[in-house]
Amino acid sequence: MSQETIFTKIINRDIPADIIYEDELSIAFRDINPQAPFHALIIPKKAIATINDITEQDAPIVGHLYVVAAKIAKQQGFAEDGFRVVMNCNEHGGQTVYHIHLHMLAGKIMGWPPYQDKKKGLI
């Protein structure tokens, strides 16, 4: 399932994004609907639809996304305070764009377990 997504368009510079990091394997940009004071998406340049589509050969790419997350946390100044990274998979997991991506959230204390509260939003 390798269809062009909004992320492919960002990678190809067909649509704009607030890019905060880029290298040969990945790109990171601010989420247009932030759920925390800092909310970025870290994506591989290789199109992989879901976690279920990751192969053994993709392991270095997926691991690289976490290395990038650590770099961004240090650059943005919240590595020591902490942050959350999460990757959703398919509809019940909350995935809306079918190109794997890490959500990187920081700038507030994150609750656990996350839950939906109609008054407070995602915690």
Image (cartoon, grey):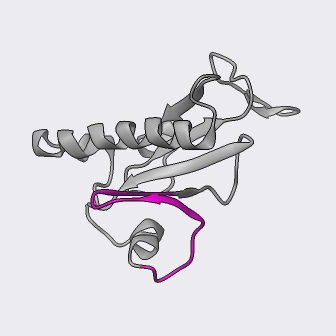
Residue 54 in sight from this viewpoint: no
Q: Which residues are magenta?
A: 13-28
Please give left or right for residue 61 compared with residue 109 in the image: left
Of all residues shown, which one is farthest toward the bottom? Answer: 14
Residue 100 in picture, x, y percent from top left: 37, 50
Q: Is residue 76 left or right of residue 3?
A: right
Q: Is residue 1 above or below residue 103?
A: below
Question: Residue 110: x, y in percent?
Answer: 68, 23
Q: Which residue is more in the foreground, 70 or 88? A: 70
The verdict on residue 25 being magenta is yes
- The number of numbered discs placed on residues in the rendered structure image is 0
* x and y percentages locating residue 88 in the rendered image: 46, 39
Q: Name the residue located 85 percent from the left edge and 32 percent from the top edge.
A: 120
Q: Residue 123 appears in which quarter of the rendering?
A: top right
Q: Residue at x 50, y 34 (%)?
A: 85
Q: Is residue 71 left or right of residue 32?
A: left
Reply above or below: 39 against 83: below
Q: Quadrant of residue 55?
A: top left
Residue situated in front as seen by the camera: 37 or 77: 77
| Outermost residue, left side | 57
Look at the image and say whether residue 21 sits in the magenta stretch: yes
Q: Nearer the viewer, residue 6 or 43?
A: 43
| Rendering coords of residue 44 (x, y %) | 33, 55
